[in-house]
Structure formats: structure tokens, C-alpha cells
Image (cartoon, helix red, strand yellow):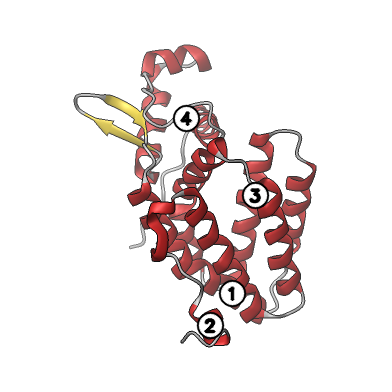
Amino acid sequence: MTSVPTPIPSRTQYVLEEIKRRILTGRFTPGQALVETDLAAQFGVSKTPVREALKTLAGTGLVVMSQYKGVTVRMVDADMARAVYDVRLLLEPEALKRAVRRGASLDAARDALARADQADDTAERSLANREFHRALYVPCGNPLLGRMLDEVRDQAALVSAVAWAADPSWEREASEHREILRLALGGDADGAARALHSHIASFVRRAFPEVGADFEAAPEAQKEDGQA
């Protein structure tokens, strides 16, 4: 029998989304302790939904639960960035390529890009950018591939939040997003995939220079440049 996920109670869902939002927009910083009693008081709930929300967030990799230190926001370092972005580089361009080749609608990506351009603050822009990337890979035609990328989505956003706090690069990334979408809407599946690969790799190289050569250009791009 196929198991059916247990629905998350509404209070737990509210607490979960609010804690996640605060982490991904930098209000809760890496290494910060998340104390159940304090959070329960902030959100006007009992400790039970807070505890359940934190367990869920631990499962997605946003927080770490320790017997001795309690719950803390996950620290971001080069090893984490390397692992998360390696998965993205392997899967995300391929998912976009498949979405374009099957003629999937990318209206959601266009809408998310517009929201990012019109955002009034960092939090709103960050959330819109996350939706832009998800809108590129979800219509790939393979739900499992989409779920695999969803698994690292929050961790990637945490890496981005830390990097943006140190060196905001919204305009450059917005320009790259527009080029990716232009190629995708034009039906250039391979070109869009290469542009997305370059976008992801260049971001992590800028944010974590120590990762360096681990994130080179896409193989297709290297062939075109005569570097194969």
C-alpha cells in the first residue's frame, strides 16, 4: 500500500512557514538558537506546534537538532554549498531542458520574474526568485525529479540568503534570469539549460570562492568553446 502523508495541522503549518520565512530572509541567522518557549510566545501558540514545525524543518535541512545545543539554524559553509549546488547543477538544467522540449507553460516563471523585479524588499524578492526557479523545473514531466529538487530548495535558499547578506547581487541575477527565460520561451532547450547551469555555477563561485573549480561551465558550453 502507498502511504498517504499526514496533513500538517494549521497552527503547525503557520509556525513552520513563519520560521522558514524568517530563516530564508535572514531574520534568523545561521547558528542562532531557536528556543521553543520563545517561539511559542512570539507566535501565540503552545510549544507543541513549534516543536512539530522544528522537526519538519530539521528534515528539510534548515535547522539542526542537537541533544546538547538544542535547535539552531543550520550553519552555511563551503561544504554545504558544494553539496547543495552540485545536486542543483546535475538536475535543474536537465529538468528545464525537458520542460522546454515538451512545450510546457512557463507563465508561472514569467510571473515570478515580474514579482522579483517589482519587489519592495529583500524578503519579497528572495521568495519570488525561489518561485522563478521552481517554475522552471516543475513542468519537466517527471514529478519525482521535481520532488528531488524541492528537497534541496530550502537549503539552496539558505545559502543564497547568507551570500546576499554579504554581497547583494540582485541585478546581475535578474539579468541572468531574464536570459534563461528568453531562451526557454524561444524553444531553445539546450541554450536555456546551459544558461541556467552557468547561472547556478557562477553564483556559488562568487559566494564561495573556495569551492572554485568544482563548478565549471556546463559540458555542452565547454564543447562549443573548443575545451572538450
Q: Nearer the viewer, residue 108 or 129?
A: 129
For the N terminus, the quadrant is bottom left
Q: Which residue is mark 4?
A: 12
Q: Position of residue 111 (x, y in %)?
A: 77, 54
Write the residue at 46% across / 38% down: 8
Q: Earlier in the sequence, mark 3 or mark 1?
A: 3
Q: Which residue is mark 3?
A: 129
Q: Earlier in the sequence, mark 4 or mark 1?
A: 4
Q: Which residue is mark 1?
A: 194
Write the residue at 72% across / 52% down: 112
Circle 4 SS class: helix
Q: Nearer the viewer, mark 4 or mark 3?
A: 3
Under mark 2, the amino acid is Glu
Under mark 4, the amino acid is Thr
Q: Earlier in the sequence, mark 2 or mark 3?
A: 3
Toward which corner of the image does residue 137 lie, by quadrant? bottom right
Under mark 3, the amino acid is Asn
Circle 1 SS class: helix
Q: Earlier in the sequence, mark 4 or mark 2?
A: 4
Q: Earlier in the sequence, mark 4 or mark 3?
A: 4
In the displayed structure, would residue 101 be above or below residue 6? below
User: What is the CA distance from the residue labelled 4 to the residue labelled 2?
Assistant: 45 Å
Q: Nearer the viewer, residue 87 or 208?
A: 208
Under mark 1, the amino acid is Arg
User: What is the CA distance from the residue labelled 4 to the residue labelled 3?
Assistant: 25 Å
Q: Are marks 2 and 1 in contact (CB under 8 Å)?
A: yes
- Identify the disc placed on residue 220: 2
Q: Residues within 10 Å of mark 1 (few under 14, many from 20)?
A: many
Q: Earlier in the sequence, mark 2 or mark 1?
A: 1
Write the residue at 41% across / 55% down: 84
Q: Position of residue 40 (x, y in %)?
A: 44, 16
The reply to whether residue 141 is in sight is yes
